[in-house]
Image (cartoon, rainbow, N blue to C red):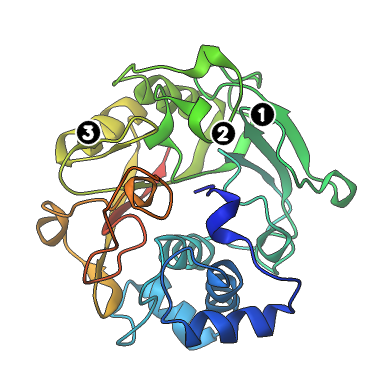
Amino acid sequence: MSLPKSFTSHKDFSEEEQIQDYIAAGRLPFSPGYDPYRWNVIQRTLVDDGLMERFRRYETLPAGYGQYLDERVVEYPWLLSRLEPATKLLLDAGSTLNNLRLLECSTLAPYEKYIVTLAPESVCYWEHGISYIFGDLRSLLFRDDYFDVITCISTLEHIGMDNTLIYTGDGSYKEYVQDDYLNAVRELRRVLKPGGKCYVTVPFGQYQYDVFQQQFDVEMLTRVEEAFKPSNVTEYYYKYSETGWNTATQADCKDARYFNVHKTKYFDKNSKLDFEADKAAAARAIAALEMIK
């Protein structure tokens, strides 16, 4: 999630100083210091063999894990716990992996990596061998059966929505085409090799439309699987509470509500809305799919 600079800006402090200030100020989501604090949690998780094994085995997480943090703290470890280091072709559909902390980790580093996103981002790593393609996931430029692995992390929810609010200045992407995420799913299947794996995560719970995205419910998740037509699929669920993130069932998550930080008084000068008691930063539940073509 991209956020207005007014709330995320900070003085020219070191990351450690930013983190300490963030903690001292009460750890309000997306306040100054939030981003380095979150990345610190993610990085420590990725090098913690015991914790990564819990993700790999889909076991209960430690109490307090990811408290007051958004869904990236479970999405990244879940994904990287399932990938095996390999010299193969990997497509990051949506550019959620466009960070050197991830791209150069021991799991991802061996892959030949392609990133597809709507528009150029402020930071890119072409000098590290990352190939960037700017385009629409509903109409990919690759031939059939090309990639060994596809990752699509927190991206399908934005397909067909108003992407001019955050991701691009191209007015043609100011849309509301509710079912177009299915066209993207079909394209991901098309460019994946037979036997290849596709990893998808989406915010999950009650259906919600928030202009720039929609939260998936059970019916939408089922339609993803029907469109992909996997030879095998495994579903995983994680749910947020005031004590942090943990494993869950679909039934546990079906009533979860997404917290849209853009509607709070910190981003909308006409709003009086504050964070809720659990300090949810964004999604309160995610569904994660491992689909084999």
Residue 154 located left or right of residue 230? right
- The amino acid on which the numbered mark 1 sits, given as a three-letter code, is Ala
In the picture, the disc for residue 119 is 1
Q: Which of these two is toward me, 5 or 121?
A: 5
Residue 16 located left or right of residue 153? right
In the picture, the disc for residue 220 is 3
The mark that comes first in sequence, 2 or 1, is: 1
**Residue contact between numbered discs 2 and 1, judged by CB atoms under 8 Å:** yes
Residue 29 in which image quadrant: bottom left
**Alpha carbon of mark 3 to alpha carbon of mark 1: how far?**
27 Å
Q: Which of these two is toward me, 255 or 16?
A: 16
In the picture, the disc for residue 167 is 2
* Mark 3 residue crowding within 10 angstroms, few (<14) / some (14–19) / many (20+): some
* Mark 1 residue crowding within 10 angstroms, few (<14) / some (14–19) / many (20+): some
In the picture, the disc for residue 222 is none
Q: Which of these two is toward me, 23 or 67?
A: 23
For the C terminus, the image quarter is: top left
Residue 211 located left or right of residue 241? right
Residue drawn at point x = 74 percent, y = 53 percent = 87
The mark that comes first in sequence, 2 or 3, is: 2
**Is residue 47 among what the camera can see?**
no
Camera-nearest label, 3 or 1: 1
Residue drawn at point x = 74 percent, y = 43 percent = 122
